[in-house]
Image (spheres, rainbow, N blue to C red):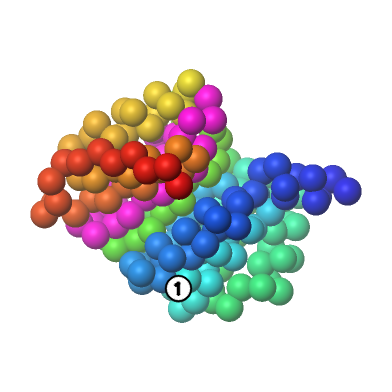
């Protein structure tokens, strides 16, 4: 009972899952990075969109990581690695593997400082065509503040606010634009 309740309350919805799928399907990144595996639902959507692309997912909770790994082994067609442990430490560990063309889904530690730190770390590796998706951008005042700050960074050329999620496009040939869509 606990697992199903957790999945319903904390996993990405079908609508947003399909959006993650479409982003990776359209973009075909060299790597997918997920911060916050949870039960692995978003991992499956991300991996299914680009099944040949290596996906590295970081989860802070050992039990959730183990359950997610079981589900992902049954469902994911592509190369998926689950990294269990403290998110900043694990992100530091895999950061040298991150190519310049990636899709990142940031859905872990929903507080201002860690979120800004994670996105800044990803920006160190970013290429012109990378895409960063932030989940729960209005979940708390801290997340709202993090979203507002990240959108203001010069590397972020286009931000798309879908209320539940935010998408950051980093192509230098795009004009600085902030878009809000009722999704």
Residue at the extreme right of the image, as rendered: 1
Residue 112, quarter of picture: top left
Residue 121 is a magenta residue: yes
Q: Residue at x 66, y 67 (%)?
A: 72
In the figure, is residue 150 to the left or right of 66? left
Q: Residue at x 80, y 51 (%)?
A: 4
What is the crowding at mark 1: few (fewer than 14 residues within 10 Å), some, or many (at least 20)?
A: many
Q: Residue at x 33, y 44 (%)?
A: 160
Q: Residue at x 14, y 51 (%)?
A: 174
In the figure, is residue 23 to the left or right of 68? left
In the figure, is residue 9 to the left or right of 104? right
Tell me the SS state at disc 1. loop
Residue 134 visible (yes or no): no
Residue 165, image x and y in percent? 46, 43
Asked whether 16 or 43 is in front, the reply is 16
Residue at the extreme top of the image, as rendered: 141
**Which segment did they paint magenta?**
115-140
Residue under pointer 1: 50
Query: On screen, 116 above or below 7?
Result: above
Residue 122, image x and y in percent? 35, 47
Residue 125, image x and y in percent? 29, 52
Residue 122 is a magenta residue: yes
Residue 127, image x and y in percent? 23, 57
In the figure, is residue 89 to the left or right of 62? left
Residue 176 visible (yes or no): yes
Query: On screen, 138 above or below 123?
Result: above
């Amino acid at each position: 009972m606990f697992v199903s309740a957790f999945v319903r309350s904390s996993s990405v919805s079908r609508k947003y899952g399909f959006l993650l799928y479409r982003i990776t399907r359209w973009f075909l990144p060299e790597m997918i990075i997920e911060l916050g595996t949870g039960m692995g639902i978003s991992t499956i959507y991300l991996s299914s969109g680009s099944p040949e692309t290596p996906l590295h997912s970081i989860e802070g909770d050992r039990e959730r990581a183990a359950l997610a790994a079981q589900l992902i082994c049954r469902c994911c067609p592509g190369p998926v690695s689950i990294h269990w442990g403290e998110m900043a430490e694990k992100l530091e560990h895999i950061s040298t593997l991150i190519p310049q063309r990636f899709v990142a889904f940031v859905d872990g530690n929903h507080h201002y400082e860690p979120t800004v730190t994670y996105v800044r770390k990803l920006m160190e590796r970013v290429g012109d065509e990378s895409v960063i998706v932030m989940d729960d951008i209005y979940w708390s005042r801290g997340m709202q503040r993090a979203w507002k700050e990240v959108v203001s960074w010069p590397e972020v050329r286009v931000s798309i606010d879908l209320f539940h999620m935010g998408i950051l496009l980093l192509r230098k040939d795009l004009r600085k634009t902030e878009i809000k869509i009722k999704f």
